[in-house]
Image: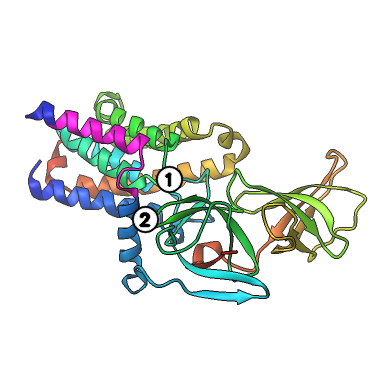
Amino acid sequence: MGLVQLTGYSLLVVLAGFFQQWPLLAVNGIRANFVMVLLIALAFIPDKFYEYLWFVVLGLFILKFQSGFDGALLGVGLITIAAFWLGREMPWHWIVNNTALVVAGTLVVYILAKPSFILSNWLVVLGEIIYNVIIGTLLFFALASDERRSKF
Amino acid sequence: MRYIGLTLLAGLLIAILFSNLFNGAKHAVFDFISDPSFYDPAPIAKKVGTRHFVLTRLYSTYPFNYRNLIAINLGSRSSSIKLGDPVTVDGQTLIGQVIEVNPNYSLVKTIFDSEWSLPVRIGDKAVDGLLIGRQEPMITTIDKNQPVAVGDRVFSAGREFPYGMKIGVIKEIYDSSTIAFIQAKVGLDYNFNQLRELWVLSN
């Protein structure tokens, strides 16, 4: 991955972090996990893991909101790091792999952060899954236009 | 070289997860980008009755749906803000409470947070209830024999806030033979997503 591409994608991650913390982009009070879906879509691009790890570190830094440990951040970190290998190993079409990882990622974040929230606010979680899948699919196709995605 | 890079990135990852590394600087950058004219202003204060309020700017919100926290640009360096201070929309309507104070910014837990609960009183008869935080805040444990109607005023009754701070009005009432208490949805006269400034009770 060239320096220009690395810088461009890094800026995209920072922008996604701003969007995620911007209340105006919440639909019916539900906000999408922009950083996670972007990182999952990006997981299909770099060949070298350390390049991808840079995006994950940057994304988590932007999302870090309060002092101390945050289970939701750990969830985003785990699922996005796993996506680097799982995305390539999963047996389905790339877009299906991306969608499956986005759905699993949304649930993993809540399981690690506050599992009871899934049951007590299942409509919010369902809404976020739908929102994330829509954003994730759009991002995947946008990134697929990159010449490095010709392998898809 | 590659392994050194990987080790550094892994170290950074752990530091970000478990510490407050660069968080203050990041919030300051957020603040500056969102409105440079407001960056590091002298605190603006106003008095409502005997209460003193300090103006603060809301510049980011917690990025996940299961909490509703907001970051404000009032910190211990530029003001006397402290843990537990009530935060209001306009000097009268309670919206949250300060839960973390840093030199350059503070965090506020709002009434929309899933971990928020506050004793409240409803209407002229001051009927007891418990306000539970959610995207549309709900009052539970209202006695079925008490007179509660749509449009009744809801105000705070918790010990950590001044008594009688306005929260909203009763919007919908849920009653059923299968539940022991009445529940009610609270209507608010502001749109949370469009709030840009808040007032922190400083005394």
Q: What is the chain identity of the residue bearing mark 2?
A: A
- Are there few (<14), some (14-19), or many (20+) residues within 10 Å of tag 2? many
Residue B101 drawn at (x, y percent)? 46, 52
- Are there few (<14), some (14-19), or many (20+) residues within 10 Å of tag 1? some
Say whether residue A53 is left or right of residue B140. left
Is residue B184 visible to the viewer in this orientation of the structure? Answer: yes
How much space separates mark 1 and mark 2, taking CA atoms? 18 Å
Please report the residue visible at 31 percent of the width from the left and 43 percent of the height from the top: B21
Main SS of residues in magenta:
helix
Give the SS element for disc 1. loop
Q: Quadrant of the N terminus of chain A?
A: top left
Residue B7 drawn at (x, y percent)? 18, 28
Does residue A105 belong to the magenta stretch?
no
Please report the residue visible at 85 percent of the width from the left and 58 percent of the height from the top: B148
Q: Name the residue under label 1.
A: A66
> In the depicted view, which residue is nearer to us: A41 or B25?
B25
Please report the residue visible at 39 percent of the width from the left and 55 percent of the height from the top: B103
Give the SS element for disc 2. helix
Badge 2 amino acid: Phe
Residue A19 is labelled as 2
Range drawn in magenta: B5-23
B161, above or below B64, in the image: below
In the displayed image of the protein, which residue is found farthest to the right?
B145
Residue B1 drawn at (x, y percent)? 6, 29
Please report the residue visible at 62 percent of the width from the left and 47 percent of the height from the top: B116
